[in-house]
Amino acid sequence: MRRYGSAVLLLLVGGAVLRISLFSELYLRYVQAALRPYLVISGSLLILLGLVAAVRGMRQRDHEEHDDHEEHGEHGEEEEGEEAEHDHGHSHSHSHGGPRIAWLLTLPALALLLFPPPALGSYSASREEAQRAAQGVGTFSALPAGKVLDISVAQYSSRAIYDTGHSLKGRTLRMTGFVTHGSNGTWYLTRLLVTCCAADATISKVEIRGDEADGAPQTDSWVTVTGTWIPKGKLGTDGAWPPVLKAAQVEQVKEPADPYDKR
């Protein structure tokens, strides 16, 4: 790259990292919220290094201009001066020109700065095999009291598949996720569970049934579903997957700032 290439690349990457972590919540599409301070620090350091590289480039340019001025003053005759200038310029074109195609390295950083990718959705979910909760069959802790209980898709899935105490029985439950489709008109309320970052995302999904589930929403649209648990299969077996919810209400909502689920 040319003189300021590395500085530009560092500034672009640092700016992109700060944009998604310090000035917005886009970083939640990549990592957990607890990692935000580290992203801010990393972005700030990259910008600092970019500024240092830019200052060094400016100083190098001034030094070369000073050398050119002194060299031109040593030649008394015009022909000798022109020849020396040509040789010196030719030398500089080789040492500082560099391949112009190297500037293409800035395009990924620029794209991240201007066009951050969306959160993982139905395509990522379709690539996952059925993921089971880490715990085995057993009794879960009691659920909080309340007429309508807000619960994550991952929590509902774990209790529906593994809870011998049937803590979901008789409760009105509300959960939010994006829509994925199955066969024969079946659709699912789906969330991706992130342990550390988007690269380790696993799927949790709930099959939605009932009159309110007729006319499946569009794939990848976000909905909040309120309903009751429908037992399915033997606990801890493939027959219990995916769990089922009888919908009493389906409401379309905006994608949340943090699109990933929590246990």
Image (cartoon, grey):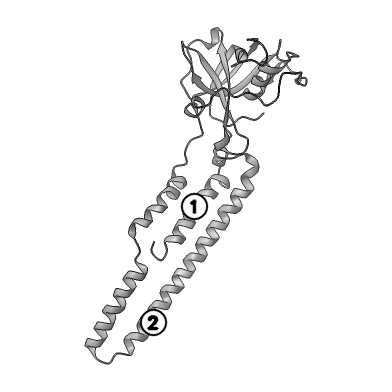
| Residue tagged 1 | 13
Q: Is residue 3 left or right of residue 35?
A: left
Q: Secondary structure at mark 2?
A: helix
Quick check: 84 above or below 43?
below
Quick check: 34 above or below 204?
below
Question: Residue placed at 45% from the left, 60% from the top?
Answer: 6
Image coordinates of residue 64 in percent, x first then y, are 39, 77
Residues packed near mark 1 inside 10 Å, few (<14), some (14 to 19) or many (20 plus): many
- Outermost residue, bottom direction? 76
Question: Residue placed at 57% from the left, 35% from the top?
Answer: 200
Q: Give, as a three-letter code, the residue at label 1.
A: Val
Quadrant in the rendering for residue 68: bottom left
Image coordinates of residue 209 in percent, x first then y, are 56, 10
Q: Secondary structure at mark 1?
A: helix
Question: Residue placed at 46% from the left, 13% from the top?
Answer: 183
Give 101 or 41, whichever is nearer the viewer. 101
Quick check: 227 above or below 135?
above
Give the alpha-carbon distance from disc 2 to disc 1, as whole Å.
34 Å
Quadrant in the rendering for residue 70: bottom left
Q: Quadrant of the N terminus?
A: bottom left
Give 185 or 221, whichever is nearer the viewer. 185
Check if mark 2's residue and mark 1's residue have beta carbons within 8 Å: no
Q: Is residue 49 left or right of residue 33?
A: left
Residues packed near mark 2 inside 10 Å, few (<14), some (14 to 19) or many (20 plus): few
Image coordinates of residue 56 in percent, x first then y, are 48, 70
